[in-house]
Image (cartoon, grey):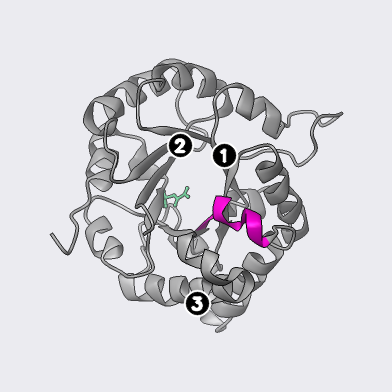
Amino acid sequence: MRKPFLAGNWKMYKTVGEALDLVRRLNISVGQMRDREVLVCPPFTALKSVSQILTDSQIRLGAQNMHYEKEGAFTGDISAAMLVDVGVEYVILGHSERRHVFGESDTLISKKVPAAISANLKPILCIGEKIEERQAGQTQSVVLRQLEQGLSAVPKDHAAHVTIAYEPVWAIGTGHTATPRQAQEVHALIRGALQKKFGSTAETIRILYGGSVKPDNIDSLMAERDIDGALVGGASLTPESFSRIVRYANAGS
Ligand code: PEP
């Protein structure tokens, strides 16, 4: 079975002191939960300090981006090995802000995903359509293209290391969440495409939903069959709201 996965993307928020304060509080409230995976993705500057706090915790550490080359003249960038060196386990790749604010292409992202896996990082590949693409009926083709290209250099025996995050761009940071049904529809499409590509391994790949996830909508999203967790931006910045999201109410219980 797929373990539920609740991930917080802190984006460009939190100084080191603020990050430590947040992670200490999260550690108290959700740091020993073993029936779900909890991930925090602080900015680069806070990774090492946060990693030190998490040594005896079940909370995992992730980064928000990386370069695909091992090292080199890439001013302002960071390598997979540098992230591993400070205790990072996961890395978010292809986030919509990287795609649409910084112009990252499917081709670039397709190099990062296998580079992360080769360095022993677990990539979280983000995909999702813009509002005009949804309105033009292109959701399926956009999502499938980003998925196929992002995973184009991932062999079947490495597929289990990958997590997918479906994040419709129109839902990120806007307060407009996809309805559980809208999200499930796309998650089922993604699951089908993963099955075609990777066979039975697809059943082990977690597909997260992201886009204005809050304490008051997490329960209904998590009740959907193919929604295995959430990638949370704004609501991961306070211990109260992220802890509540992590402790979502299971529809079956
Ligand atoms: C995100 O940053 O991936 C995200 C989904 O942000 P928010 O939860 O704020 O919409």
Camera-side residue of 203 and 89: 203
- Residue 128 x, y percent position in the rendering: 55, 65
Does residue 246 show up? Answer: yes
At a point 37% along the width and 32% down the height, the residue shown is 59
Q: Which residues are magenta?
A: 156-164
145 left or right of 226 in image: right
Observer-side mark, 1 or 2, equals: 1
Residue name at image x 38 percent, y 49 percent:
5
* Pointer 1 or 2: first along the chain: 2
- Cα separation, mark 1 vs mark 3, equals 25 Å
Residue in the foreground of this view, choosing between 200 and 31: 200
Horizontal placement of 196 versus 103: left or right? left
User: Real-space Cα distance between discs 1 and 2?
Assistant: 8 Å
Taking the view exactly as shown, the residue that stands out farthest to the bottom is 137
> What label sits on residue 177 in the rendered view?
none
CB-based contact (under 8 Å), mark 1 and mark 2: yes
Which residue position is annotated with label 1? 64
Residue 223 place in picture, x, y as percent: 26, 66
Residue for badge 3 = 189
* Chain-order first, disc 2 or disc 3: 2
Residue 103 in sight: no
Q: Residues within 10 Å of mark 2 (few under 14, many from 20)?
A: many
Residue at the limit of the structure toward the right, as seen here: 73
Q: Which residue is mark 2?
A: 10
Q: Position of residue 45 (x, y in %)?
A: 56, 22
Q: CA distance from mark 2 to mark 3?
A: 28 Å
